[in-house]
Amino acid sequence: MSCFYRALLGLLLVVVVSCGPAAPDPLEAIPDPKTLDESYVSDPDRVLRPATVQLLNSQLRALDQSGRAHIDVVVTRSIGEAVPKTTATALFNRWKIGDAEKDNGLLLLLVLDQRRVEFETGYGLEADLPDIICFRIQQQIMLPLLRDKRYDEALTQGVQALMVHLAASAAVPDSSRVATSSPAPESRAVAPDGATLTPHDRWVGLGTFCALGSFFLCMLAIGLSPNDHRSFTFLWLGLVPVGLVGLLNLLHPTIDDNASLYAIIALSYLLPCGYLHWTVLQLNRRYAAQPAALSRRERYTYLERQHSSVQTFFRVLFFPVGMLVYWLWHWRRMHQLRAAPYACSNCSGGTMHRLSEKQDDALLKPGQAAEEKTRSIDYDVFQCTQCHQTLVIDYKNLGTTVKPCPQCQYLTLEAQEPTVELAATTSATGWGWKQSRCAHCQHQTKKVRYTIARKSSSSSSSGSSSSSGGSSSSSSGGSSGGGGSGSSW
Ligand SMILES: [Zn+2]
Ligand SMILES: [Zn+2]
């Protein structure tokens, strides 16, 4: 074809397009789904796949027949210069969507060239689908898909979210539900907002729950790990479940799967739990690698330092399954380290057995007995059954506040109850004396003056405010109250 003909053809095309019949009213170009063989989807430009239209029709028919709501879906490539919101209201009112009495209609309009989605709700649905919920469904579920031009998924998932909401709010025992079924919808009250949760809300909630829970449990597990094997760099473990929540939600915005939900919650617990068990394993590996020359007392003290009773208590409380078994085994090991008989160093073949606490008092020096009394040192006394040679082993109480006495050198200097010379008031500090006394030689330290902090003036005021939101609306049979929401993508 020559250049000339091509130019002529182009010119002809321009003429035909510009002189063609004037564009019809965009509203006229959109057929009412009701006129399309009992359909709920109006897709004059055939944007959607036939399977999608079929799926939406069957879902929306079931919803309509249940009497809960009547949702019409409209997809159009263009409505010219018309405003989508105005168009949605106009179509809603022209088609009279929904039951005349319940006014439970909803129009979902998609305008592709203006990249706009509109929900237009009837008065009867505004309580169950407040604008904020409509907006959230659009923003969180539909828009990401619409931006990818995945119109079929955007609509099926959007409609799915709407149906989940409607089902959830129907399950809420609410006086408004009575009004719905009665022929007098005028008395309808607005349902409390937040009564329903989208899958997205659930995942946001789960994310927050996991973030707080796993961070707390990680802090706890690290705090409970043996002193020599503690590392706060492992706090990142607490972020793993949160990351998983975010990732899953990103990949499947509408996921509503309890199994993965519970798996993530379990992981929030199992990761810190695993960390703690791992550090305990590390400790026992290091303990096994200790030089063989180490005395039983040294081994005992080493282990005791890594297993304070407070730590052990909380280990068993929060991570009971493994830690209880470990604790029982550890307790037996500690008992053997302390109480197992020694071979006598004085005679050959003699065995030294541990005496009872009562028996050993007679063999301890008065200072040692005072130390036992103040619980600063616990003495184990072993005696040979043959030659009666004794062996005294001291076990210092790692948590003691008793100090060494400057006079007799025993660990028997105890702080006395401080005296109050001037009591503190809310406006002024007070003062008193502090003093320590030796439980063995009765030596007393010099009095030390101390300050008593001012009493805090507790002036708390409590106020309660309650707000109740509610409004009633009358319906005029399938007309839109201007409710709904719109979003651009
Ligand atoms: Zn002996
Ligand atoms: Zn003393």
Image (cartoon, rainbow, N blue to C red):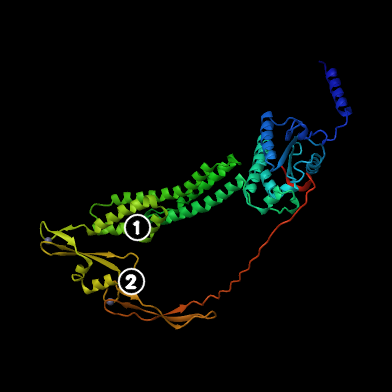
- The three-letter code of the residue at mark 1 reads His
Figure quadrant of residue 365: bottom left
Viewport quadrant of the N terminus: top right
- The three-letter code of the residue at mark 2 reads Val
- Residue topped by disc 1: 307
Q: Which mark is residue 402?
A: 2
Of discs 2 and 1, which sits in the foreground?
Answer: 1
Question: What's the CA distance linking mark 2 and mark 1?
Answer: 21 Å
Q: Within 10 angstroms of label 2, few (less than 14), some, or many (20 or more) residues?
A: many
Figure quadrant of residue 152: top right
Nearer the observer, 183 or 100: 183
Q: Secondary structure at mark 2?
A: loop
Are dots 2 and 1 in contact, CB under 8 Å? no
Q: Is residue 461 above or below residue 316?
A: below
For residue 149, say whether it is visible: no
Q: Is residue 94 above or below residue 313?
A: above
Q: Position of residue 375 (x, y in %)?
A: 30, 69
Q: Position of residue 61 (x, y in %)?
A: 69, 36
Is the shortest distance between ligand 2 and the CB of mark 1 under 8 Å?
A: no
| Ligand 2 rendered quadrant | bottom left
Viewport quadrant of the C terminus: top right
Nearer the observer, 203 or 294: 203
Q: Secondary structure at mark 1?
A: loop
Is the shortest distance between ligand 2 and the CB of mark 2 under 8 Å?
A: no
Q: Within 10 angstroms of label 1, few (less than 14), some, or many (20 or more) residues?
A: many
